[in-house]
Image: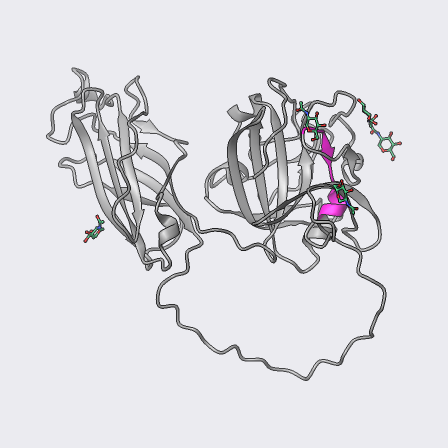
Amino acid sequence: MTKLLAGGVFILILIVLTHASPSSYFKVLIREIDNPSGTLLDGTPCSPFGFVGYGCNTYLSGGVAVGSELSPTADKIALNSHGETKISNLNLILADPKDNEVTEFTGFNVSLKLTTVDGSVIDQYDFRVDTTDSQGVYVYTSKRQGTLATTISIAWATNIPEASLTTSTPVYTGSTPTPGPTTTAPKLPSDCDEVKNKTSGIQTIYPDGLNPVDVYCEQTTNGAYTVIQSRGTSTNITFDIPYSNYSDWFGEPGIGKNFWMGLDNMNSLSNNGKVYSLQIDICCGTQLRGKQIYHGFKVDTKANLYKLTATADLPGIGLDYSSTFKDIGAPFSTEATYSKPKSKGWWYGSCGNNLNGFLYPSDNANCTVE
Ligand SMILES: *[C@@H]1O[C@H](CO)[C@@H](O)[C@H](O)[C@H]1NC(C)=O
Ligand SMILES: *[C@@H]1O[C@H](CO)[C@@H](O)[C@H](O)[C@H]1NC(C)=O
Ligand SMILES: *[C@@H]1O[C@H](CO)[C@@H](O)[C@H](O)[C@H]1NC(C)=O
Ligand SMILES: *[C@@H]1O[C@H](CO)[C@@H](O)[C@H](O)[C@H]1NC(C)=O
Ligand SMILES: *[C@@H]1O[C@H](CO)[C@@H](O)[C@H](O)[C@H]1NC(C)=O
């Protein structure tokens, strides 16, 4: 994430899940690989310094398959060339290209191969993750001989429904609700999903039901996206503003423009009873470089320092940076409330993700929003 900050245009987007019918996805995040013994599968040291645990220059290839044949072997990826034993923050995402053919999630198979540059096998994994295995990050230990086994840390996410889900009839208790007062006034749109005009572009929404704000709406077949923040070419709009100015919106809505929807608007919107997902698209020019999705996005009240709530679709990256440092759960801060100078406004928990921070413009052509 930090290195992507040196890119170009950043866009923060909300997608309305209540409206969305997302296509199926299945992905496995390879987070970390630790190969501490510095030996090949057959026990041969990778280097003359193998006896001190010097690592092997590691290449990785692999694939994942969900309920079908294993996907074709991925390209060989050079992981390191300096003999480090541990590759943290690898953040490599593998996906099964056939996931759309799968209607029931029954688990998945992973096949990974660590080799040296000449193809000698350092370690190999072919393992299965069942639906009963807990969702999230866990560690797989190789079967390699010796006391220092290779470990690999993975996480996974899918929206394919689990097979043989037992359906239960919901039980309702309590009294019959009294009908509320009828109203004839049309409801003002609180987000881009409720906007009548379904053309992507700038629209007026009323997150608190009363006060208008113009935002960029991206209407897609997956649902309506309300852009809550974007970075772009405008030089007359600065994010270097006092804390209190982040409460209200500023900037210019639109792709390739600098825009902030305002924390009070984000608080009203995310607490209106609907469930929102946050999507962060990181772009360099027109090229989408990275996409992160977080579920259950909520911004707390001003009194609670606009604390950020969300659940990372794939744990351990972006706003969910590490087990100890996360932007999720952090209060909104600026230079005045956070120790780092020139920190601009953000939910500082990890110090690594400030999308409102200094923008290094490169190719500032429009960012394609999916
Ligand atoms: C997936 O793993 C299971 C259990 O190890 C194995 O029986 C099955 O053949 C594997 N499927 C594929 C397609 O490799
Ligand atoms: C719908 O919104 C688009 C984008 O903002 C705008 O160009 C168009 O004029 C709007 N159409 C109507 C009928 O208001
Ligand atoms: C920034 O400049 C653009 C023209 O380049 C102008 O349309 C816009 O109103 C300006 N915004 C502010 C906040 O001054
Ligand atoms: C901050 O907000 C105040 C009150 O709306 C306004 O007067 C001031 O110009 C803003 N400051 C900046 C740097 O935008
Ligand atoms: C970005 O898109 C806007 C609206 O479509 C357009 O006016 C503008 O020229 C585009 N900017 C670039 C750099 O392509």
**Is residue 26 depicted above or below 36 in this figure?**
below
Magenta region: 256-266
Dividing the picture into quadrants, the one containing residue 145 is top left
Ligand 2 located in image quadrant: top right
- Is residue 216 at least partly visible in the picture? yes
- The image shows residue 8, relative to residue 290, as above or below, that is above
Residue 179, image x, y percentages: 76, 79
Residue at (71% x, 34% y) in the render:
254
Give 88 or 3, whichever is nearer the viewer. 3
> Can you give x and y, in whole percent of width and height, for residue 201 in the image?
72, 40
State the residue lying farthest toward the bottom.
175
Q: Is residue 98 left or right of residue 352?
A: left
Image coords of residue 357 (percent x, y) = 65, 26
Closer to the camera, 267 or 70? 70
Tell me which residue sits at (16%, 15%) in the image. 48
Say whether residue 92 is left or right of residue 198. left
Report the residue at 56% width, 39% height from top: 370
Whether residue 64 appears in magenta in the rendering, the answer is: no
State the residue lying farthest toward the top. Answer: 48
